Image (cartoon, helix red, strand yellow):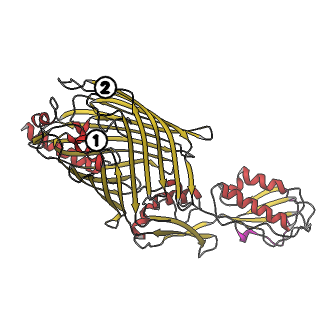
Amino acid sequence: MNSRWKRSALAACIAAATFISNGAEAQAQNYERYKPLTVPSQPSAQPRVQPERLEPVQGSDKVLVEELAGIIVLDHNDKVDAEDSHAGVLGIQHDFDDSTSLVYGNGVQAILNRYIGGTVTLRRLNQMSRDIISYYRKSGQPVVDVVIPEQKITSGVVQIVVTETRIGSVKITDGCHFDADDLCRWIQCTRRGDKIYENKLNNDLFWLNQNPFRRVSVDMRPGAVDGTTDVIFDIDDVCPIRGYTGYEDTGVRTLGLERLYAGMIYGNAFGKGGLLSYQYTADAEFYRLNAHSVSYAQPVNRSYSWNAYGSWAGVSPTIPTVNQDGESWQVGLGITRHLQKTQWVDTNWSIGADFKQTNNNLEFGGQQVQNSAADLLQLRLSFQHLWRGCRDEYGLLTLDSFVGPGSGFTSDHNTAAFNTIRANTTPDYFYTRLRAERMWNVREDWQLMGRFVGQLASERLLFSETLGFGGYDSIRGYDQRVYSGDDGWFASLEFGPRTKRFGTCSDPNTFRAFTFLDMGGGSVQDALPGEVSDEFLISAGLGMRLAISDRISMRASYGHGFESVPGAESRDRVHIGIVSLFGPRVR
């Protein structure tokens, strides 16, 4: 009875996780090794509101009145009294219904005060109008009309009409591949009848441009009613399919160091803007490793998104004592709650679930293949905060926590099955992993990047959940997974010249060279005979990253390890990775 209740409760937890979880970067490591690439949107390159260019000030310099004694600010042409010279008015007066208008603010007041007391000419009046329009634009209101109508100015008093235009209608054009009706859900700040604010338009543009296969810009045209402006969001999209191929040396020696992969990304799955991706990964001989992975990510609204993913890997090791093939697979799902998502900040938390099955530890540097498999089920809770600064600066903080809720979900989800893969492990466990990364600009010409990853576990873990040391993404100079620890940490520092940019605006290229220092330490809980209880690694070297437009990306680094690691064949490694994307893209 207790086992049945436990399984029902666990199923309920997984069902709940389906509706409130994420799949960002928190998946554990089986899927991470083979997951498809993404084609991210580029927040810094997204379209923004572009007000019309102001024409040069024109008008005669002939003095009409020797002194401007007063200015009356009106909000509608109907309030203009063209026959009244308003003798006796001094300074600034308002007949403006909206008390929150900028005309009451210090900025407009200062502009008007600059002209009071001076001569009145057509050029100076036109310049005053232009100054007010420029101030509105700087204050985030890009559409305002300032008119000085025909009137008597013999007493030195001028009436000006400032029309803060309102939104008449909001429209979105259909793209060739994306439906306007579906995209309307992302327009939440631009509302009919509101004033036009640049930050609200840019906010809607940010969300409309989250899909990398479309670019949405905004256009503003005179409305059907005086004093209104129609806002039109224009879609420029391409066929939402891109493919890619790549090479990297991220394998382990028992399965070959080289990895070849190819994949495809479809960016409008089910007509809802979802990203459906697939990748095939193999060793250089297409024999030792064959892996398939798929992912689907679907934004729901500005607050939630969800995703599902899975992978399968078959391995045929070149170990004399092992004549059996291995197999591993994983499925997972999750939902993200977006707390804040802007061009500069992305903060979210997520919850999800992973189910894995394996009969070997070969993908993680081991040498065992079993006749039976072990099933792993875990729940995941994650928090992520990403900050983007100016000129390449950024900061990233990620905290992932994983819980194994105990045995009994399947017949192979128990302690006995776990022990066939790694001794003294159980389905009851907890571990948490912290990742922090920061890029600084040092003076004008240099950059410093720091990264830290740490993990703490309640007990011994299966190899897929341990922290791996070695490889381009942890401690360079050593092979991938040269050591695995239940607990551990590693840190990296990269220092070099500022990222160099070259090419054109539509096809920008970047190059960055750096020196690095990597170090880290890990430990195995309750180490058994033959296991290394703890290890410390440190390395240094040189590296570079090159991006040619958004079509080719390449990384290379050479590292020398200063500490010997039992079983490691080398402490000097070149790490290489290159990927080429092809297919249509927006300009």
Query: Residue 66 in the image: x percent, y percent?
Result: 93, 62
Task: Check residue 177 in the rendering and tell me which mark sits there, or answer none.
Answer: none
Q: Amino acid at mark 1?
A: Arg
- Can the viewer see residue 299? no
- Left or right for 139, reference 60: left
* Coordinates of residue 40 in the picture (x, y in percent): 42, 55
Point out the stretch of residues depicted in magenta: 76-90
- What is the crowding at mark 1: few (fewer than 14 residues within 10 Å), some, or many (at least 20)? many
Tell me the chief SS of the magenta region.
Answer: loop
518 magenta-colored: no
Report the number of discs. Answer: 2
* Image depth: mark 2 or mark 1 in front: 2
Give the secondary structure at mark 2.
Answer: strand
With 416 as the anchor, is 236 left or right in this view? right
Q: Vertical placement of 52 versus 401: above or below?
A: below
Q: For the point 64% across and 61% down, which residue is it?
A: 142
Query: Looking at numbered disc 2 in the image, what kind of residue is underneath it?
Result: Glu
Q: Which residue is mark 2?
A: 535
**Local secondary structure at mark 1:** strand
Side of 69 where 218 appears, left or right: left
Residue 530 at x, y = what percent?
A: 19, 25
Q: Which residue is mark 1?
A: 380
